[in-house]
Amino acid sequence: MGFPMKIGIDFGTTNSSVAVARNGVVEMASFASSSGLSESFRSVLYLDMVKQAGGLTGVKSWAGNIGIDEYLAADPKGRLVQSLKSFLSSRLFDKTEILRRMYTLEDLIARILRDIREQAETQFGVPIRDVVAGRPVRFVGSDKDEDDQFAVARLEKAYLQAGFEKVQFVMEPVGAAQYYESRLDHDELILIGDFGGGTSDFSLLRVGPGIRERGRRPNDLLGNAGLGLAGDAFDARIIRKLVSPALGAGTQISSMGKMLPTPNWVYAKLERWHHLSFLRSRETINMLESVRAQSQEPERIEALLHIINEDLGYQLHRAVQKTKCELSAATAARFHFTDGTVEIDSMVTRAQFEEWIVEELRSVETCVDGLLTRCKVERSAVDMVFLTGGSSFVPAVRKIFADRFGEEKIQTGNEFTSVARGLALM
Ligand SMILES: Nc1ncnc2c1ncn2[C@@H]1O[C@H](COP(=O)(O)OP(=O)(O)OP(=O)(O)O)[C@@H](O)[C@H]1O
Ligand SMILES: [Mg+2]
C-alpha cells in the first residue's frame, strides 16, 4: 500500500459517499450493490444471528448495500437499522439491545464507518487514517448548540472507533460549496441549500477562483443555518396519511367498558425510520397483542404487528421512497405496499403531498429568510443558489428558491455526491 491519504466522507442519514482529491481531480469510491457499482453507500446496518464454528450462535453485522441484500435474503429476518445519524443528538439513546446484545450508538455507526474506510482503502490502495468529515449545521432532534456539540462529539467517537485517527469536521453545505466553486470561472456570492434525508442545511458564502487565489478569509463565509428535517420528515407525512390509518391509527379499543384510542406513540415511532426497527421489543409487541384483542379493527392491528415482527421497515421505506420520487417527476403517483396479508394501495397527487408537507416547507422558508436577514444580505445580492441533496428534487422545495431568487439563478448537480467531493477538495 502507498502513502496514507486524507479523504472526504459525507456520512449521510440515508446515503454516504467518499471522495479523494489528487492534484485537484476528484475520485469517488464505488461500492458494490446488487444493481452494480454505486457511488452511494446506504447508511444502514443489518444484524443477524449466525451459526458459528462449534455450533454456537453469534451476531454478525453487514453495512451498506450488502447489508440490504443480506436483509432481503434472510428468513426470518434479523434487524435492519436505518437513519442512525438522526439519533446522534439524543441523550435518550445511550445503549440499545439488538438480538440480545447491547450496543452504543457509536458502536453501530462505527461499524458502518469502518466498512466505508476499509472499502475505500481497498479501492484507493492506501491506508486511510485522516478524514475531512461532514456534519449538518443542526442535527435532527437538536434544539440548541449544546445538542449539536454533543452530537459531533459522538460522531467523532464513532470515527475514531472505526479506525480513523484524525477527524476534521466541516459543515456539509460548506463542503457542497467547495464542490460548486470547483466549477466556477469567476467569483460569486452563493447560497447553498443541501436537502438530505435527515437535515436541511444552508450556507451563504463567497466563492470562486479569485477568492481562492487571494486566500480565504473567515468573513467569506457569511453564515450557516440548518433544520433537523428533510426527506425522512416528508416520508413521515406519507406514513401518517397513507400507511398508519391502514394499520389501526385513530381506531378504538374497548377496555373495561370504555372506548379508548389505540396508543398514538406507536404510530409516531412508525413514522420515523430511525425509530421503526426499535419498535420490535417484547414489551411493545405484548402491548400490541393485547390491543389487538380489544380492538374494534383487530385486522389492522394484526397488520401493524406483522410489519413490526417481520422487520419490514426497509420495504416500507422503499414503497414510500418510490411514491415520493415519482411525485417529483409526475403530478400523481400510486402508493403500493404488500407483504403477507397486508396490502395498502392508493393514489396520491403532488398537490396532496405538498399539502401534507406544508409545515416543513414553511420551516425551510423561515430558515432561509432568517439566514439572509441575519447576514444583512438582500435577495438580489445573491448571485446563484446551488441546490443539492436528494430532497432538492422535490419541486416544492425548489420553488421556495425560484420564488425568492428567480428560476435563472438555480443551479443543481451531483445531488448525492457534491458534499463528499467538496470535502475531498478541502
Ligand atoms: N427524486 C427524488 N424526489 C424526492 N426525494 C428524493 C428523490 N431522490 C432522493 N430523495 C430523497 O433524498 C433523501 C436522501 O438524500 P441524500 O442522500 O442527499 O441524504 P443524506 O445525505 O443521506 O442525508 P443528510 O444530509 O440529511 O444526512 C431521501 O430522503 C430520499 O428519499
Ligand atoms: Mg447529505
Image (cartoon, rainbow, N blue to C red):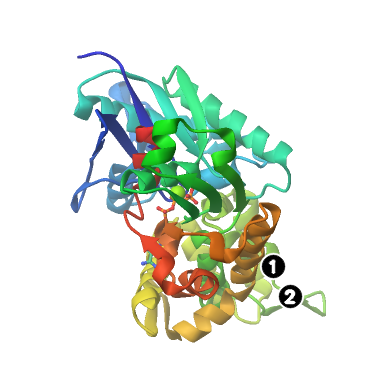
| x and y percentages locating residue 21 in the rendered image | 28, 31
Q: On the rendered structure, is 344 left or right of 55?
A: right
Say which quarter of the image contains residue 217: top right
Seen at 27% across and 45% down, the residue is 39
Say which quarter of the image contains residue 324: bottom left
For this rendering, which residue is in front, 265 or 59? 265
Secondary structure of the residue carrying tag 1 is helix
Closer to the eye: label 1 or 2:
1
Residue 164 in sight here: yes
Callout 2, which amino acid? Pro
Secondary structure of the residue carrying tag 2 is strand
Badge 1 vs badge 2, beta-carbon distance below 8 Å: yes
Callout 1, which amino acid? Asn
Q: Does 366 appear above or below 174?
A: below
| x and y percentages locating residue 342 in the rendered image | 43, 74
Which residue is denoted by mark 1 in the rendering?
Answer: 264
* Label 2 beta carbon less than 8 Å to ligand 1: no
Q: Residues within 10 Å of mark 2 (few under 14, many from 20)?
A: some
Which residue is denoted by mark 2 in the rendering?
Answer: 261
Seen at 36% across and 51% down, the residue is 76
| x and y percentages locating residue 215 in the rendered image | 46, 30
Q: Does 361 appear above or below 94?
A: below
